Amino acid sequence: MTKKEFYKLWSLNYPEAVPISHLLKYDYPDRWFRIHSLPESKRYAEVEAEWKILLSRQNEIITDLFGFDTPILLVKGEYNLGSNEEALWLWEREDGL
């Protein structure tokens, strides 16, 4: 997928938001949910056994939602505030707008 294709797809589905995951729960609260995959709602795996539990449970959820052999798009982002803490996100558009 090109940047242009991604931008078009994102804009169609989330026109009021930039692709920063922790902000989506505020922009689209009716679409947001959290899945606690580790025992006792632990947030982060720390040992190999917890990673295995996490992977197993996430694979089960994804399979239940999408089935087998369904193409899906996972979006991962990286950002750095650097020295400009005012600019939380700079959205690059392919069309120059």
Image (cartoon, rainbow, N blue to C red):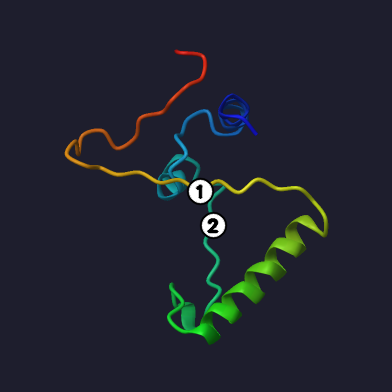
* Residue 36 x %, y %: 53, 71
Q: Residue at x 52, y 28 (%)?
A: 15
Q: Is residue 15 left or right of residue 18?
A: right
Write down the residue under mark 1. 76
Left or right: 62 as drawn, with respect to 18: right
Q: If the image is split into quadrants, where does the N terminus sit?
A: top right
79 over 92 or under it: above or below: below
Residue 42, label in figure: none
> Which SS class for mark 2?
loop
Residue at x-position 43% and y-position 43%: 20
Residue found at the very far left of the displayed protein:
83
Horizontal and vertical percent for residue 59? Answer: 68, 68
The quadrant where residue 58 appears: bottom right
Residue type at numbered disc 2: Phe
- SS at mark 1 in the image: loop
- Furthest residue in direction right, as rendered: 68
Name the side, left or right, on which 68 lies relative to 81. right
Q: Are marks 1 and 2 in contact (CB under 8 Å)?
A: no
Mark toward the viewer: 1 or 2: 1
| Of 34 and 67, the residue lying toward us | 67
Q: Is residue 95 visible?
A: yes
Mark 1 and mark 2: Cα distance apart in space = 17 Å
Query: What x and y, as percent, mark residue 25?
Result: 45, 48
Tell me the quadrant of the picture where the C terminus can be found.
top left
Residue at the disc numbered 2: 33
Q: What amino acid type should be assigned to the residue bearing mark 1?
A: Lys
